[in-house]
Image: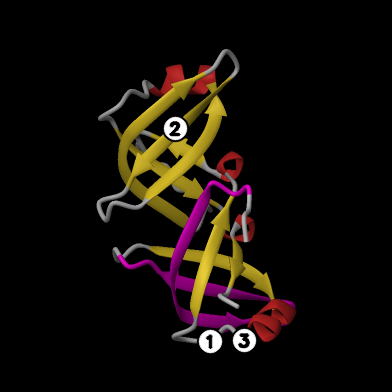
Amino acid sequence: MKISARNQFRGKVVSVTPGAINAEVTMALPGGEEIVAIVTMESVKSLTLKEGTDAIALIKASSVLVMTDDSGVRLSARNSLAGTVTALDKGPINAEVTITLPSGDAVHATITHKACDELGLVEGVAATALIKAPLVILGVPA
């Protein structure tokens, strides 16, 4: 399957916390990072999500926020992946930012050119990718 989501992470489900309508699913990546997704209970059932299930987390680059200095700010985004900017492609309106995690996995974000400048993004600067859990799409190998 080919898909347009730039961020595709393979890992294993480490926990499923069911709710009345949705469930919180935590997936561990091979490098030790975790990604949390909020999916419907119907998706948990149809994908047979349980501890140990191989899964793929898909996240569109436009759903990724970028932060360079948290300054003690507390956010509701469940996924916070810290790394280093390793690629930056600035267009007239938007910029594509690649943040490489310590494990070697990369997170791609599309942000405005202005935000890129205001954050002082250049290759080599520390940055954190923030992703709200409901924006993570989960899949399982066929």
Secondary structure predominantly adopted by residues drawn in magenta: strand
- In contact (CB < 8 Å): disc 1 and disc 3: yes
User: Which badge, 2 or 1, is on the more N-terminal residue?
Assistant: 1
Q: What's the mark number on residue 32?
A: none
In this rendering, the count of numbered labels is: 3
Q: Is residue 115 left or right of residue 2?
A: left
Whether tag 3 and tag 2 are in contact, CB under 8 A, the answer is no
Q: Which residue is mark 3?
A: 48
Q: Position of residue 93 (x, y in %)?
A: 60, 17
* 7 within the magenta span: yes
Q: Amino acid at mark 1?
A: Lys
Q: Secondary structure at mark 1?
A: loop
Q: Position of residue 142 (x, y in %)?
A: 60, 78
Residue at 49% across, 83% down: 53
The magenta segment is: 4-30
Marks 2,1: beta carbons within 8 A: no
Placement of 128 over or under 94, stated as above or below? below
